[in-house]
Image (spheres, rainbow, N blue to C red):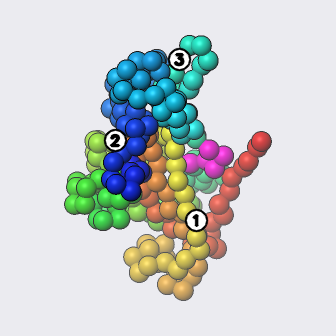
Amino acid sequence: MVPMSKTAGGVEPQYLKVKNHLREGIASGHWVAGDLLPSEGALVAQFGVSRMTVNRALRELVQEGLIDRVQGVGSFVAQLHRISSTLNVRDVQEEILERGHHYEAQVQALLKGKASPQQAAELGLKRGAPVFLSLIVHLENGVPIQCEERAVNPACAPDYLAQDFARITPTHYLLEVAPLSEARYMIEAALPGEVEAKLLGISRRDPCLVVKRITYSRGVAVTSVKLTHPGVRYQLQGSFSA
């Protein structure tokens, strides 16, 4: 979760109080997709702020895709979709099957751990808080093409550790239990670490395509994942339309 902004004096801006109240209500399920949110007038009265302040909070929630506003009617919780941007969150199993090839997954680790400083920052958790961890190798026609290192917010997917990820991918499962509302990516070329090289059956000198992604549902960080692909075996594909 993105840290809340504060002024230089450490006081939270008034519009953020309104915005975070609505975000937290949506995240907790108090308001679900299609629900009518409190009116601008009701929020003005509740928080003792100006209509302009409330309008800014609502406008930013619209920009984040969490709510829809209908002129003369009010603000509604947005319908959440599996795809939130032109860069699709693809399931590697679906990619392989679309090519008519055989898919296989090898689960190397699936456990409950403590969030590292980086994982805590990415998932909006306290350092050392419980976190679900998985390490999975995905194979195409028996050849490893992706090493998936993932951390999951237990509050968003409490049954994560009970899943059979040799049968269903974490991506597919998480999109079902925590519908995607936002995703943040970083894509880079890098050399593999010792564990990644061993699992992918490549040399430490072989270049890899690395995708790091944090996904959100209803404004809450669900999972942080690092996907490492041997550069000679994988192409990142997508599409864009205006």
Mark 3 against mark 1, which lies toward the viewer? 3
Indicate the position of residue 184 as horizontal and vertical percent values.
52, 53
**Would residue 173 be seen by someone viewing this image from the given angle?**
no
Seen in the picture, residue 85 relative to 110 is either above or below; the reply is above
Disc with the residue nearer the chain's start (1 vs 2): 2
Q: Look at the numbered disc 3 and give the secondary structure of its residue.
A: strand
Q: Give percent across and percent down for residue 234.
A: 63, 66
Image mark for residue 156: 2
Q: Nearer the viewer, residue 52 or 235?
A: 52
Residues in magenta, as a range: 85-89
Q: Residues within 10 Å of mark 2 (few under 14, many from 20)?
A: some
Badge 2 or badge 3: first in the primary sequence = 3
Query: Residue visible at 46% across and 28% down?
Result: 50
Give residue 151's position: percent from left, percent from top: 35, 57
- Name the residue: 46% across, 63% down: 226
Write down the residue under mark 3: 74
Residue located beneath label 1 in the image: 187
Main secondary structure along the magenta-highlighted residues: loop
At label 3, counting other C-alpha atoms closer than 10 Å, the crowd grade (few under 14, some 14-19, many 20 or more) is: few
Q: Are marks 2 and 3 in contact (CB under 8 Å)?
A: no
- Picture quadrant where residue 68 is located: top right
**223 is within the stretch colored magenta:** no
Where residue 49 appears, x then y in whole percent? 41, 29
69 to the left or right of 29:
right
Looking at the rendered structure, the secondary structure element under dot 2 is loop
